[in-house]
């Protein structure tokens, strides 16, 4: 009989003591109409695979950058996105921001599969910005 | 490819809806196999159309890994814009005709 596979521990892939202060977070963009549903679906995906503190955890991915590294992150990690959102940790107070997996990856954590914090997060995203390094834009990129 | 055709692509049914930032410890983006439109096509090496919201991309399946609640698919984003792949194939077939 095959042994069941346990969920992975998100604790095991949190990077040291990195702080979200002084960073900007570059995030998903897309269709406004399905944003809330899509956000919750993506957050639930994490819970199917990972736990945090022994319980299911909900979160979505983001890339963090400093002012200096922002062009590089946009060009190398975000070039598939025509537009993006840019926020700071102060914009999403109340949500945990965890440095997970390999930099510049972070996870924006939610307390459950649904709730008001999802819409609050979407409301905090602000204006969409054009990505100057979108892959359909010709020209050299930071490397 | 025309701008109109590009706009129309938003209505296409891609192989996988993904989160382009959803990386794990491998550095690849990942989804669950049961999220695929046609899971039987998701095999290592397969080239797929991917979408998140308004953005489209090409990706290649790296591997499939058993997980607690399904099978995880690791995908590598391929360089270039999706419409450039189609344009290249169209040039190829036009010259062959």
Image: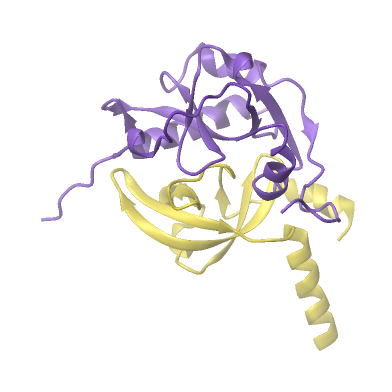
Tell me where residue B73 sits by quadrant: bottom left
* Percent x, y of residue A143: 71, 54
Name the residue at 33% across, 38% down: A12
Image chain in yellow? B
Q: Is residue A142 above or below residue A41?
A: below
Q: Colour of chain A?
A: purple
Q: Is residue A6 above or below residue A140?
A: above
* Percent x, y of residue A39: 55, 29
Tell me where residue B19 sits by quadrant: top right
Which coloring applies here? by chain
Tell me where residue A122 sits by quadrant: top right
Name the residue at 67% across, 32% down: A66
Name the residue at 23% across, 47% down: A5
For the N terminus of chain A, the image quarter is bottom left
Residue B2 seen in render: yes
Q: Is residue A62 above or below residue A53?
A: below
Left or right, A115 with respect to A29, comes to left
Foreground of the two, A72 or B42: A72
Name the residue at 59% across, 14% down: A120
Left or right, A9 with respect to A88, comes to left
Foreground of the two, A75 or B48: A75
């Amino acid at each position: 009989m095959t042994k069941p596979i346990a969920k992975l521990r998100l604790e095991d892939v949190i990077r040291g003591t990195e702080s979200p202060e002084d960073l900007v977070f570059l995030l998903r963009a897309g269709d406004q109409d399905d944003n809330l549903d899509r956000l919750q679906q993506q957050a639930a995906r994490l819970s199917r695979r990972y736990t945090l503190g022994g319980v299911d955890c909900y979160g979505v991915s983001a890339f963090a950058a400093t002012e200096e590294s922002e062009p590089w992150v946009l060009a190398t990690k975000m070039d598939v996105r025509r537009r993006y959102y840019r926020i700071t940790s102060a914009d999403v107070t109340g949500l945990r921001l965890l440095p997970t997996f390999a930099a510049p990856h972070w996870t924006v954590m939610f307390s459950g599969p649904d709730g008001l914090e999802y819409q609050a997060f979407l409301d905090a995203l602000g204006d969409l910005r054009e990505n100057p390094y979108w892959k359909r834009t010709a020209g050299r990129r930071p490397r | 490819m025309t701008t109109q055709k590009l706009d129309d692509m938003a209505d296409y049914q891609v192989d996988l809806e993904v989160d382009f930032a959803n990386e794990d410890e491998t550095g690849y983006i990942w989804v669950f196999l049961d999220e695929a439109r046609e899971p039987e096509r998701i095999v290592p090496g397969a080239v797929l159309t991917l979408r998140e919201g308004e953005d489209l991309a090409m990706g290649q399946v790296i591997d499939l890994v058993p997980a607690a609640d399904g099978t995880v698919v690791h995908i590598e984003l391929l360089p270039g814009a999706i419409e450039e792949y189609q344009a290249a194939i169209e040039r190829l077939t036009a010259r062959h005709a």
